[in-house]
Amino acid sequence: MINPGDTVDSKGKPIPFVFRWRSLVRVLLFETSVKAVALVAAEYADYDTGANCRPGNNALMRETSLGDRSVRNAWSVLRDAKMAERVHKGSSYKGESDVYQLHIPENWKGYPILGPNREAFTCQYCGGEFNPVGNCVIKGGRASAKFEKFLFCPAPRGANGRDADSCYRLWSERQANGGAAGLDAMPLVERFELFRKARDDDW
């Protein structure tokens, strides 16, 4: 797996930007629509630099099977995550598309991502392994996510849907009974500490 932050390989040969970009997008635990737009958009960017990316939203809609609103929201997330910089705003009147410069953010390791080995996560209540559900967006430079989907295994299915006694619910009750903060009341830095513990596979 290519480290998105590496610009050269072990032999000192430059790694094309698009390779690094794909590697980052693959491990991001972002919304599926954001990942889809990011992967397709890279095919329209300069291979070595990520510059001059101008797919146009209609092309992205066709190639990702997403609607206009989802594509526009994905670009908004990528801009806010400092992964895409709009260098020219197109004009629908003139038939112009927006032009982007794609970037690998310096703080990409601080985003909700899989580890380099892309291993399963460990539930912070029962200790079982599970695959985290990507659901994060970056807004105003801050992660907005349902962190319970990164930290706890999915509740088992019962006759009436998901069982109420999920690991997240049981963990929350244990926290409350011990006078500790619940997940929503924790500072973001503490939630990320739990995230890294659940991932246990650092870059």
Image (cartoon, helix red, strand yellow):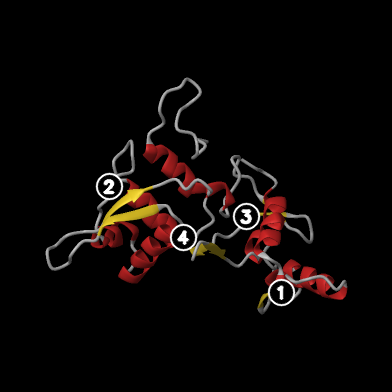
Task: Check disc 3 and report its element: helix, strand or loop.
Answer: loop
Q: Position of residue 28 (x, y in %)?
A: 52, 52
Q: Which amino acid does the dot numbered 2 rest on?
A: Tyr
Q: Give the mark nearer the N terminus: 3 vs 2.
A: 2
* Mark 2–mark 4 distance (CA, rounded to whole Å): 19 Å
Residue receiving disc 4:
32
Residue in front for this viewpoint, 138 or 69? 138
Q: Can you name the residue that lies furthest to the top here?
A: 11
Q: Give the mark nearer the N terminus: 1 vs 2.
A: 2
Q: Position of residue 198 (x, y in %)?
A: 70, 53
* Mark 1–mark 2 distance (CA, rounded to whole Å): 45 Å
> Label 1: few (<14), some or many (≥20) within 10 Å?
few
Q: Residue at x 66, y 65 (%)?
A: 148
Residue receiving disc 1:
163
Q: Nearer the viewer, mark 4 or mark 1?
A: 4
Q: Position of residue 102 (x, y in %)?
A: 36, 48
Q: Can you name the residue that lies furthest to the bottom here?
A: 160
Q: Which amino acid does the dot numbered 4 rest on?
A: Thr
Q: Which amino acid does the dot numbered 1 rest on?
A: Asp
Residue receiving disc 3:
131
Q: Which amino acid does the dot numbered 3 rest on?
A: Asn
Disc marking residue 37: none
Q: Residue at x 46, y 57 (%)?
A: 81
Q: Nearer the viewer, mark 3 or mark 2?
A: 2
Residue receiving disc 2:
44
Q: Residue at x 67, y 50 (%)?
A: 199
